Image (tube, helix red, strand yellow):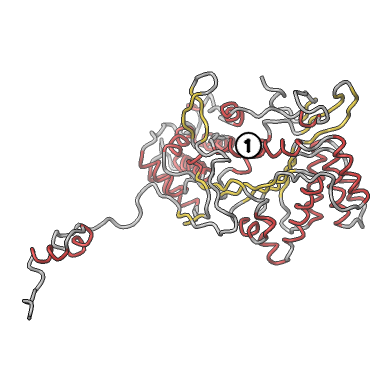
């Protein structure tokens, strides 16, 4: 039984065994087992009960249910594991007295912090359409966002503990905009009115807003700050040279408040992370590449394939699966989009079910362009599971590559390019060659001189004294 009821964003604190001076750590929700987590984030909407009686127009309208379909994959548990451990690490060194000391340091304007332990930080980067934001949002929703404390160990203890805040990186790389976005996210979480108070001070400087944000993070005990779409800052920052101030603020926020910070975005952000020495160790994390054309991809298709709203269901054939992979690049969002549009085109043209021809029509309409190469990372298929014996001696599933097992290349080195995969072999077929062809002879190996002598293809002169 779970410690906190699922689906609740605000819960009263429930304490378990923890240090007596650390109610924040004692109130944390438990880490979910893999099977329970994947079940919690899964979304499988039901097909309309009157589907056989629907007209083509009604069927096309119902295709929108594919947008609410969410197929859990094992890489998602690796992301959840990293985020949960980051939150726990924040509270491992955060006691009530420690918070008071940190706030006093900021109010007095002194340098340094009373605790030398640095909070967790990292990043999750992946190809667009791979499901990073959706995965992180669903992973965080498995735990309450706010825990309300009223009493601890028989003593009154009133405060609100905010486990996480998720914001988007402002495209203008403004410290003030980022700080105000963070305050707005805090207001939504706890029902406060801090943003209105800050905006009413028209002449307030960006540095003052930044200091106020640090105080609010400590006052409400924020465990994790997620900065999504971090790649938005790259292009703007190149023009306005605003990278350093923005990242300096985030680093200061981590150091001064001991709040964990994680960045989420596309591989474009890797340029930002590797350009400065102090960011390299703070931005380690998972780098995600699309699916491979393997069993993991087929299992993904098997879970979405029943969602066909055409009058007849098309079987999942090798040709359809390979075609869908080659034009989607193994990116889940593109797979779903092509599958959805294929059904729409079949219904528009009066076909009873989808086939290769109508799928090609949908692909041409969507004009999806998949990159030819990717930066280095781990394929989604490489997080797949194998069976091991669990505590109850029943088969359990664990990822082949957990966050600790995933090989990481040093961030000092630029990531190597990885060519995208295809289900069908690319290029022209090898031409059939005659046995006496020199190319065939070189390819087969062996003694080339003997090959030439046997076929009278070499003229030899007698040796002279």
Q: Secondary structure at mark 1?
A: helix
117 vs 409, nearest the viewer = 117
268 vs 335, nearest the viewer = 268
Quadrant in the picture for the C terminus = bottom left
Count of number-bearing discs: 1
Residue drawn at x 38%, y 33% as measured from the top left: 315
In x, y percent, where is residue 98? 85, 39
The residue pinned by badge 1 equals 80
Left or right side of 17 for 327: left
Residue drawn at x 88%, y 46% as measured from the top left: 196
Residue drawn at x 92%, y 48% as measured from the top left: 107
Q: Badge 1, how many Cα within 10 Å: few under 14, some, many 20+?
A: many
Quadrant in the picture for the N terminus = top right
329 vs 207, nearest the viewer = 207
In x, y percent, where is residue 302? 45, 33
Quarter of the image where one finds residue 185: top right
Q: Residue furthest front?
A: 465
In x, y percent, where is residue 301? 46, 36
Residue drawn at x 93%, y 52% as measured from the top left: 201
| Figure check: 246 above or below 107 | below
């Amino acid at each position: 039984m779970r410690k906190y009821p699922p689906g609740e964003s605000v819960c009263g604190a429930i304490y378990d065994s923890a240090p007596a001076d650390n109610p924040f750590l004692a109130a944390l929700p438990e880490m979910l087992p893999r099977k329970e987590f994947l079940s919690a984030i899964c979304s499988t909407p039901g097909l309309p009960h009157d589907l056989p009686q629907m007209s083509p127009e009604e069927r096309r309208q119902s295709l929108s249910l594919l947008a609410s379909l969410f197929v859990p994959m094992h890489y998602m548990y690796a992301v959840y594991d990293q985020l949960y451990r980051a939150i726990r690490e924040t509270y491992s060194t955060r006691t009530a007295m420690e918070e008071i000391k940190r706030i006093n340091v900021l109010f007095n304007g002194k340098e340094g912090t009373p605790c030398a332990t640095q909070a967790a930080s990292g990043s999750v980067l992946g190809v667009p359409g791979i499901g990073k934001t959706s995965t992180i949002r669903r992973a965080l929703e498995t735990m309450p966002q706010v825990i309300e404390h009223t009493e601890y160990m028989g003593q009154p203890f009133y405060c609100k503990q905010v486990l996480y805040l998720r914001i988007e990186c402002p495209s203008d790389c403004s410290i003030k905009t980022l700080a105000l976005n963070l305050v707005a996210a805090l207001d939504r979480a706890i029902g406060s009115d801090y943003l209105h108070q800050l905006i009413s001070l028209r002449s307030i400087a960006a540095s003052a807003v930044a200091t106020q944000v640090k105080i609010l993070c400590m006052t409400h005990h924020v465990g994790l700050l997620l900065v999504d779409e971090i790649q938005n800052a790259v292009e703007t920052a190149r023009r306005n040279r605003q990278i350093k101030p923005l990242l300096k603020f985030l680093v200061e926020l981590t150091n001064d408040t001991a709040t964990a910070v994680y960045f989420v975005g596309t591989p474009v952000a890797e340029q930002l992370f590797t350009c400065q020495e102090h960011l390299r160790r703070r931005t380690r994390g998972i780098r995600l590449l699309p699916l491979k054309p393997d069993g993991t991809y087929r299992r993904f298709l098997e879970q979405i394939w029943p969602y066909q709203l055409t009058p007849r269901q098309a079987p999942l054939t090798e040709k359809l699966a390979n075609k869908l992979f080659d034009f989607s690049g193994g990116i889940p969002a593109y797979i779903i989009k092509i599958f959805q549009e294929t059904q729409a085109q079949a219904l528009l043209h009066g076909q009873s079910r989808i086939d290769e021809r109508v799928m090609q029509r949908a692909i041409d309409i969507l004009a999806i362009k998949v990159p030819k190469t990717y930066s280095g990372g781990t394929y989604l298929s490489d997080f797949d599971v194998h069976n091991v014996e669990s505590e109850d001696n029943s088969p359990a599933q664990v990822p082949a590559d957990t966050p600790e097992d995933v090989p990481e290349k040093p961030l000092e080195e630029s990531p190597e390019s990885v060519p995208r995969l295809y289900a069908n072999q690319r290029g022209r077929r090898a031409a059939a060659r005659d046995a006496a062809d020199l190319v065939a002879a070189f390819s087969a190996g062996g003694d080339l001189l003997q090959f030439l002598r046997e076929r009278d293809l070499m003229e030899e002169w007698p040796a002279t004294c």
